[in-house]
Every structure is written in structure tokens, then in C-alpha cells.
Image: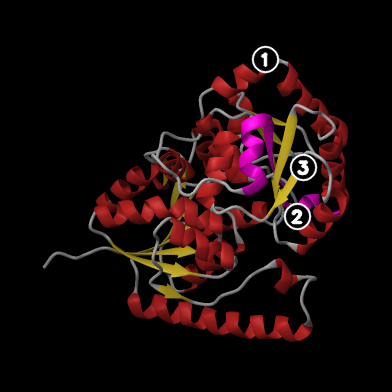
Amino acid sequence: MIYQKNIAIIIGTRPEAIKLAPVIRALKKEGIKTTVCIFRQHGKMLDETLRELNVKPDISFSISISDRMLGKGSGLIQKGIAGLQSGLGILRYMKFLKKEKPDMVIVQGDTLTAFLAAFLAFLTKTPVAHVEAGLRTYDKFAPFPEEINRQLIARLADIHFAPTESAKQNLLREGISENHIYVVGNTAIDTLLQVAGAEEIGPPLRGPISEVFKNRKTILVTAHRRESFGEGLKEICSALKEIAHRDDVEIILPVHPNPNVEKVIREELGGIKNIELCAPLPYTKMVEAMKASYLILTDSGGIQEEAPSLGKPVLVMREKTERMEGVDAGVSKLVGVKKEAIVAGVYELLENKEVYERMSRAQNPYGDGKAAERIAEILSNR
């Protein structure tokens, strides 16, 4: 009798769905039994992305971890209900691990979902593999709480799938055995290239957004980091107001539903000429928006990885990034959250053709679209 390997994959957020979808497909192609387990750090956005990428969950544990539960944004009763549901979900997850005895649990990135899933797996002595391991700023508050999440996961994981050589070196400096580290690339690029290479991504963007792409240089903006809440986000909005005065640009900003973000952005930027605020875009629409943009302003980690594969310069609105490979390769640039620096960075790319072309033509250091294949092959052979 041939033993069939059994791997549980944990997904709780939209980025995890995007980055683990190709891993799920690759593992199944290798003939490995794969159980897709859902936590619920993201709700509607997660469900939407799973449908888009044709990922069918096998089991949901109703473990809800969110800003609204942990801080402001919901009442005591709502928090109590969410806490009770999550507690029951944790018990179900632990029971699943003990009963099904998966050979390994795979977590991705730096979310609360990834840390909690890895920690509970550790308590049941279930091996853990960490996809996108080794990213570091070594500032525990930037990004918060992601930096600490990934450092803690590194202590819990048995296999570390690093996206780059630089990430591997971080892990080696922390005492992780080289025998447990594999440089595979970033699985986000696998999904991006598959979606971007499709003949038709889906129904075209509707309304004012589609018209924007035809007439002006489009600046795609995403802003949602916790460390930017408050004054940082207001500085970003102030910069966007000034940039919007130009007649040759239009700004597209999908507004993150976090109340700490949405309230500020709609108050500061609602009704401003040349700024289009919209609801968060489905993943395939976000890829379409990236393809159609001239440049991208973001504080997102995933977009720093994805945009270079589409030839789009990225200005990173953060003081520190755990993805320095992009900065070193010249595909992205740190501009922080101060108005003057953001405006200067955007104007340079709009007005200096040489700088723009240098950034847009540089090679993406994050992968070639085959990371998931490498992960599946490694796990199949172990």
C-alpha cells in the first residue's frame, strides 16, 4: 500500500488566497491529498477571491480575527459573539489536527491567521511549512503586527519557503538550518502571470474607471497599513490632492473597508476632481487596473511584488519595507508618508522619461511564475 501524503493549507485573508491558490493546484497535480482550511480574518473579500481563483474550501473553522474585533469598530456584544465563534473554531481546528493528523500544515505570509494556525499546529506537534518566509524589517512596529507575526512563525516552522536569496540570508542569520530553507520565488507572481496572461480577464471595468484609462496617465493608489492610521494617512491624502491638480493624471483609489481608512479617505478625498474613489476591486479587476496604470502608489506588500512583472514603477508609501529586493533592483522606491516626498516621487516619474523607463524595464526580483511548482516538488520528494 502506497502512503498518500496529506497536507492542510490554511487561508484566512485575500492575499493568502491569491498566494496559495497556485500551491493548492500544484500539490494536487503531484497527487498529494490537500485539505483547504478557511479561517475568516477577511470575510466577503476572501470569499470573492476564492471564487475568482476557483479555490473550493474543504472546511471552515469560523475563526474571525479583525481590527473590529480587537479594537474599535464594534460593540461589546458583537465582539463577544465573534470571540465565542472564534473560540469554538479554534477547538474545531485543534480537533481536526488531532483526528486527521495531516503530515504538514502550510501557512503563508505574516497575518494573524498564519501565526495562529502555525502556533496551534505546533501545540499538536504537526509540522509547519511557511510560504514567503524570511521577510524582515527588524522593526517590530513596522509593519505592525506583521513583522512580529513572521518572526514568530519562523520559530514554529519546520520548512521555510523563502521567496528570495535575501530572505534566506535573514533566516540563516537567525539560526535556521540551511537544510530547512528553500528559495522558490514568490507564489504571487504565479497567480499574477496566470491572470494577466488570460485572453480576457473578465468583464471590462465599468463606469468612470474605464474612461480614465483611455484619456490620462492613471495613478493607481492603495493605502491601508495600520502604521499609517491617523496623521500618516492624512499626509497621503494631502499629497494626492496636490497631484490631482494636474490635468494629465487621474487617480484611482480602491478604498479599503477598514473604518480607520475609509472614514479618513472619504472625508479628505471625496468629490476631489481627478480622484476616483471606488470599492475594493476583485482580484482580476485589480490586475486589470495594474496593467492599465502608468505608475502605482502603495503601502501594500503584495503589489510591491506584483507590479514589476507588469512593468509598472512602484512608489512605496512606507518608511520601511521588508521587500528591499525591489528597491535594490530599481523597480520600486521608498517615499514614506510625507506629502512632499510622495509628490516629488510622483512628479519625477511623470516628468522624467529616463527614470520612468529605467524603473519600468528593470527585472522583477520576486520570481518567474514557477514558485508553486517548486514547493510541490520539494514536498513530494521529502
- Residue designated by label 2: 226
Q: Is residue 240 above or below residue 147?
A: above
Q: Is residue 232 visible?
A: yes
Count of numbered circles in the view: 3
Asked which secondary structure carries label 2, the reply is: helix
User: Foreground residue, 377 or 268?
Assistant: 268
- Image quarter of residue 264: bottom right
Q: Is residue 136 visible?
A: no
**What whole-number distance in Å separates the C-alpha atoms at marks 2 and 3?**
23 Å
Horizontal and vertical percent position of residue 209: 65, 43
* Between discs 3 and 1, the one toward the N terminus: 3
Identified by mark 1, the residue type is Lys
> First in sequence: mark 2 or mark 1?
2
The disc, 2 or 3, on the residue closer to the chain's N-terminal end is 2
Q: Which residue is mark 3?
A: 275
- Left or right of 351, for residue 200: left
**Label 3 – label 1 distance at C-alpha:** 24 Å
Q: Is residue 301 on the magenta stretch?
A: no
Whether the residues at callouts 2 and 1 have beta carbons within 8 Å, the answer is no
How busy is the neighbourhood of tag 3: few (under 14 within 10 Å), some, or many (20 plus)? many
Q: Secondary structure at mark 1?
A: helix
- The residue range painted magenta reads 207-230
Instruction: Verify whether residue 218 appears in magenta.
Output: yes
Mark 2 residue type? Arg
- Front: mark 2 or 3: 3
Question: Which residue sits at x=48%, y=68%?
Answer: 122
Q: Residue at x 60, y 67 (%)?
A: 41
Judging by the rendered image, the residue that carries numbered circle 1 is 353
